[in-house]
Amino acid sequence: MADHKPFSPLPFFALFISFLFLCKGATPARGRSHAHEDRGDAGAAPRLQTYIISVLQPESATVAGREETERWYRSFLSVDAAAEDAGTGERRWVYSYHEVLTGFAARLTEEEVTAMKKKEGFLHAYPDYVLHPATTHSPEFIGLCC
């Protein structure tokens, strides 16, 4: 009978680790907020980012209508953020939440968010960013498309 060499898992382990490093470099970062990136142009206008702002419910919320509630939300914004941006005509106000949470979404600068944090009734500012689905259950993958 022939003599067999003992099986060594070391080459397979090294190959597996190499494969992991190769795959890690090929996957894009998901759900990353770019709120703190330096754009390098010091003279440019402040960078706007969409934030979801959570605030306390106003005391008169039980009798207030949507208009009153939205007026309460807008009181958290600076004068610049409450109006349209005159330079681009871009709206800064995005959405008023009435069912899911007490708050709103708006395009703000970091300085405006910092100033808003000092106001009574402010709870939290969540930077909004796009999350792409990370699944194999897409129509293309399961052959339902094209």
Image (cartoon, rainbow, N blue to C red):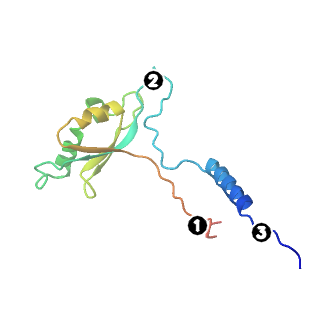
In this view of the protein, can residue 12 be seen by the observer? yes
In contact (CB < 8 Å): disc 3 and disc 1: no
- Residues under labels 2 and 3: Cα distance? 67 Å
Residue assigned mark 1: 139
Which one is earlier in the sequence, the residue at label 1 or at label 2? 2
Badge count: 3
Q: Quadrant of residue 16?
A: bottom right
Vertical position of residue 64 compared to residue 142: above or below:
above
Residue assigned mark 2: 44
Residue 102 drawn at (x, y percent): 23, 51
Which one is earlier in the sequence, the residue at label 2 or at label 3? 3
Pick the residue in front: 91 or 99: 99
Q: The residue under label 3 is which amino acid type?
A: Pro
Crowd around label 2: few <14 · some 14–19 · many ≥20 (10 Å): few
Residue 107 drawn at (x, y percent): 36, 39
Looking at the image, the residue that sits furthest to the top is 43
Local secondary structure at mark 2: loop
Local secondary structure at mark 3: loop
Give the label on residue 6, or none.
3
Local secondary structure at mark 1: loop
At a point 20% along the width and 38% down the height, the residue shown is: 75
